[in-house]
Amino acid sequence: MSVLLEFDHVSQSYGDTHVVDAMGFQLEDGEIGCLLGSSGCGKTTVLRCIAGFEAVKGGEIRLDGKVISRAGFSLPAHERRIGMVFQDYALFPHLSVSANVGFGLQSLSRAERAHRVAELLDVVGLSSHGEAFPHELSGGQQQRVALARALAPRPKLILLDEPFSNLDVDLRERLSREVRDILKREGMTAILVTHDQHEAFAMADKVGVMHGGKLLQWATPYALYHQPVTRFVADFIGQGAFVPATITTPNCVKLEIGEYCGLTPNGFTVGDTVDVLLRPDDVQHDDASPLTALVESKVFRGSAFHYTLTLPSGQRVLAEVPSHHNHAIGEPIGIRLELDHLIAFKRGA
Ligand SMILES: Nc1ncnc2c1ncn2[C@@H]1O[C@H](COP(=O)(O)OP(=O)(O)OP(=O)(O)O)[C@@H](O)[C@H]1O
């Protein structure tokens, strides 16, 4: 695979306000990337810079090896071959679904256009809705029309700006999987912007966590969850509790609930005091374990309970426990740690 989109120390500011700060990442041809962050972190600005609606103030954006934006130069948006899908779908209300999808295909003959439109309606599962108007479709169907319209002219890259935020949670999850399948089938490279971690994980091959205009980590969802490089990313992605510990040997760490070895505490020396992140799936319920914790609260999630447990010191940990283990608040339950790898940050850092 070759690199399609490159961000090389890209910065953007409005007056004295730095909105994007020396940002760097690479997206391979055919990959789906996602910029994830809370409101105001700069993700939409990044998307606008890629689309060509804004020129960057520093660094370079390259598409397919060619510079499309640097200080003093910005390739016009219509010459970038980038498609966009917006949060509000932005369909033309007075045009049929077919006409919406065929809108960017004016350079094709009528027959070629009809062929491409039919092909895309099939891809997004709306072949029988070609004559319908946008207001006759559900939100999810309208978003699939918007995707088909963006795919129609065979762009190099598709940008999706919070594409599912107007939809209810169930539909959002289903549609994010469907859209991923469609993009993959079409071999399309795409960047999605969202503040919803579930959406990011369901859609993307690589996710970038943004905070205050900085890209803190660009990695697979698995690596973000299991190997976050900063405390902020560890906190932002998934759930968990930080528990005090000490590095006792080059590959062992001692917590209040025991010493765990065979781990690689990178960057620490023996004697360092650290905070270890325990995810709910690291804390296993085991009736036979001599180690117990008190149930402080619990949330029923159907297949599992999310327990908040209190260790003897008062330290809280979270545990995901199959829901047939229904324990009462205040009850002690046996626990065991399953630490595959260590996520630890120096105490106070
Ligand atoms: N044209 C502008 N002029 C001045 N400040 C701007 C402009 N556009 C955005 N900003 C500021 O830049 C910061 C980043 O905005 P941006 O829209 O990129 O964030 P975002 O992460 O996409 O947020 P949201 O999820 O709320 O859309 C915000 O503080 C915003 O107020």
Image (spheres, grey):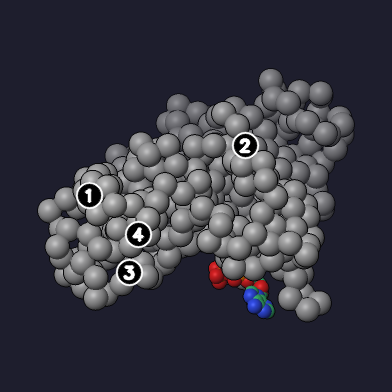
Q: Residues within 10 Å of mark 3 (few under 14, many from 20)?
A: many
Residue 163 in the image: state x and y as whole percent. Answer: 41, 61
Q: Nearer the viewer, mark 3 or mark 1?
A: 1
User: Which label was assigned to residue 91?
Assistant: 3
Q: CB atoms at circles 2 and 4 under 8 Å apart?
A: no
Inter-mark Cα distance, 2 to 3: 31 Å
The three-letter amino acid code for the residue at tag 4 is Gln
Q: Which residue is mark 1?
A: 111
Kindly check if marks 4 and 1 are in contact, taking CB atoms under 8 A apart as contact. Answer: no
Q: Which mark is residue 185?
A: none
Q: Earlier in the sequence, mark 4 or mark 3?
A: 3
* Residue that appears at 74% across and 53% down: 60
Q: Which mark is residue 3?
A: 2
Mark toward the start of the polypeptide (2 vs 1): 2
Q: Is residue 296 above or below residue 91?
A: above
Q: Quadrant of the N terminus?
A: top right
Q: CA gap, disc 2 to disc 1?
A: 34 Å
What residue sits 21% from the left and 73% below the top?
A: 135
Give whichever of discs 3 and 1 has the lower sequence position.
3
Does the beta carbon at disc 3 come under 8 Å from ligand 1? no
Q: Position of residue 124 (x, y in %)?
A: 26, 48
Q: Can residue 263 be seen in this snapshot?
A: yes
**Residue with the most extreme bottom position:** 15
Nearer the observer: mark 2 or 4; the answer is 4
Instruction: Provide residue 296's location: percent of width, then percent of height.
Output: 48, 55
The front one of 138 and 8 is 8
Q: Which residue is mark 4?
A: 106
